Amino acid sequence: MGFLEEIVASTRAVVDRTTYLSSLPAAPPHRPARLSAAVRAAGGRGALLVEFKRASPGAADPHLPAYTVEEFVGRAEPGGVAGYSCLATESRFEGSVRDVAALAAATPRPVLFKDFVVDPRQIEAAARAGAAAVLLIARLETEGWTRVPIAELARDAHRRGLEVLLEFHEKTELSRVGHVAADMYGVNVRDLDSLRMEPEVAAATLRAANGRRPLLGLSGVASAEDARRFWSAGVDGILVGSAVARASDPARFLAGLRRPAGGTA
């Protein structure tokens, strides 16, 4: 069993629990800002989305420094954050829907609900947690692992006031889920099954997806050089995860990832 199949199986088990939604309010206390607007507002310097997660199973050392949500936001915020992402995946990532709700309560910036979304209950969880957007992964449908079509998950998200970030890895996925109504698009450098970084595959997908906007580079940003590769590919923003948690000075690290003034990489 590959990593992705394992994660999907464990995620389904979590979502099927009768207690899955019990820690969440019936509705969030306020309507969050739109993530797509925050990305566009960053303009030529590019948007930085910073991810809160407790573990990174694709890394040589999957354990990340332990910060509370509030501590994490306080450390990252001075770096010029456009929005946040939060792992809700329990297996291997040690996340939860409670983390998403805590992050949404800790910042006025929009939060992305990041999980291996296969079931409408996860869309409900994202909305009730106060997220602004939900990640939908094209490969989960192309592999036949979503319980309903991904287009239906996207429609449900929109009905609940959530935006949709549609993620691709291989360029063949673009045509296979091109009918899905999304507000943002992202290309993940990491193959979610092998957990290998595949920059050449991602580069080809970014070229094929360049007409879709806003376009985000997802994963694999551990240095300014990694960020420059994404900026050179024409993305509007990048998502940064483990490297922020590990940085001794997150604000300085994030500032070094920005697209150079003038919009050139």
Image: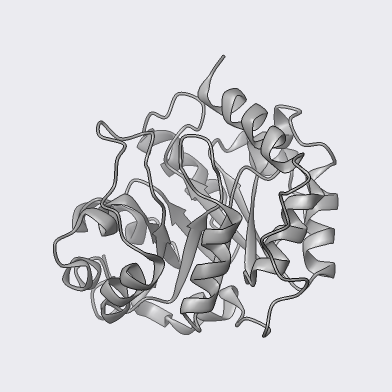
In the rendered structure, the answer to whether residue 239 lies left or right of residue 247 reads right
Asked if residue 70 is positioned above or below residue 118 in the image, the reply reads below
**258 lies left or right of 199:** left
Image-based side of 212 in relation to 75, left or right: right
Front-most of 230 and 208? 230
Residue displayed at 83% across by 42% down: 149
Q: Residue at (55%, 35%) from the top-left corner?
A: 170
Q: Nearer the viewer, residue 179 or 164?
A: 164
Above or below for 199 versus 39: above
Q: Is residue 163 in view? A: no
Quarter of the image for the N terminus: give it: top right
Which residue sits at x=25%, y=65%?
A: 257
For the C terminus, the image quarter is bottom left
Q: Nearer the viewer, residue 229 or 134?
A: 134
Q: Position of residue 182 (x, y in %)?
A: 71, 61
Quadrant of the image occupied by residue 77: bottom left
